[in-house]
Amino acid sequence: MTTLEYTEAATHNQAETSTAYNQPAPTQKPRLLDRKGVKTVVGLLVPLVLFVTWWALTAAEVFTAVQLPSPSAVFEAAVGLVQRGDLWLHIGISVQRVLLGFGIGAVLGMFFGAVLGLSRWADALLTPILGALRAVPSLAWVPLLILWMQIGEDSKVTLIAIGAFFPVFTTLYAGLQHVDPHLVEAGRAFGYKGFRLFKTIQLPAVVPAIFSGLRLALAQAWLFLVAAELIASSMGLGFLLTDSQNNGRTDRLILAIILLALLGKITDTVLGFAEKRAIARWS
């Protein structure tokens, strides 16, 4: 092979190689659960199965109407409360209590979590007492809150705030404890100190932990709502639960449980959207 022929062959091979590298990689077919709307539909399957099972059991009269009322009876109970104007009042008061208590507890939880997570002195001073208070059952606070704040909205919102405080505090405190120390030292090497160091280095590292704590706190707030509305309440979904139990209205009792589940899921979904935006912003 002459020098010219060798050069032409090498050029041809190089062009083929370049063309092969420049060809777009074959796109991978998205998995079934990654397709738009599929995950939502799959998530509705279990509630649908439960509803059909509920309807079938009541239609077959496996349980009495007092033990398990039919879906139509629960719907009629909801219609009756709407016509009386009570249902939206129950929902509105409970949502207001949850949001107020959750907001207060979350702010305090983030404050104390940040202080104890960033200060060794504050950690040594306050961690033992906060760890002990976290173990106190929710109902144990009820008599003390009534004694201090009397029977009113303040005691109910405070109890919900206590329930929301500890998940936020715990997750933020633990998240700050586990921030990579090399990142912190690198930030200090660039001259970052105090709040600037926290905002630039530590906060982006703990954003997922913060929202995990907030979502747990929101769930706790709905759980503590029922305990809060045991404090001589006359309105709210927790009151509807206990009042229905006392009056043998199982249809309203199940309605209150369904409403608590729906409201809890709706508020958690809203917080989930906020989490995605925050992670995209700080990541």
Image: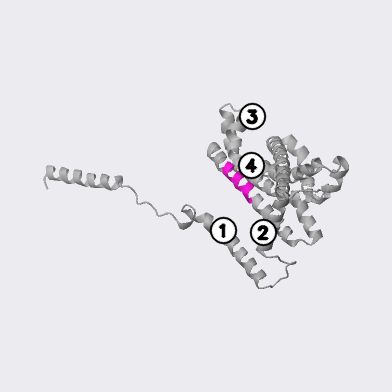
Residue 184 rendering spot, x and y as whole percentages: 60, 34
Q: Is residue 139 above or below residue 3?
A: below
Q: Residue at x 62, y 43 (%)?
A: 211
Q: Residue at x 74, y 35 (%)?
A: 121
Amino acid at the residue labelled 2 = Phe
Please give the residue where the numbered disc 4 appears in the rendered image.
Answer: 210
Q: Nearer the viewer, residue 14 or 129?
A: 129
Element type where label 2 sits in the image:
helix
Marks 4 and 2 close (CB-CB < 8 Å): no
Sooner in the amino-acid sequence: mark 1 or mark 2: 1
Please give the residue where the numbered disc 2 appears in the rendered image.
Answer: 75
Mark 1 or 3: in front is 1
Please give the residue where the numbered disc 1 appears in the rendered image.
Answer: 44
Magenta stretch bounds: 265-275
Q: Is residue 255 above or below residue 163?
A: below
Q: Residue furthest front?
A: 83
CA separation in Å, label 4 and label 1: 28 Å
CA separation in Å, label 1 and label 3: 44 Å
Amino acid at the residue labelled 3 = Phe
Element type where label 1 sits in the image:
loop
Q: Nearer the viewer, residue 26 or 182?
A: 26
Q: Is residue 46 above or below residue 27?
A: below
Please give the residue where the numbered disc 3 appears in the rendered image.
Answer: 195
Q: Tell me: 21 left or right of 148.
A: left
Mark 1 or 2: in front is 2
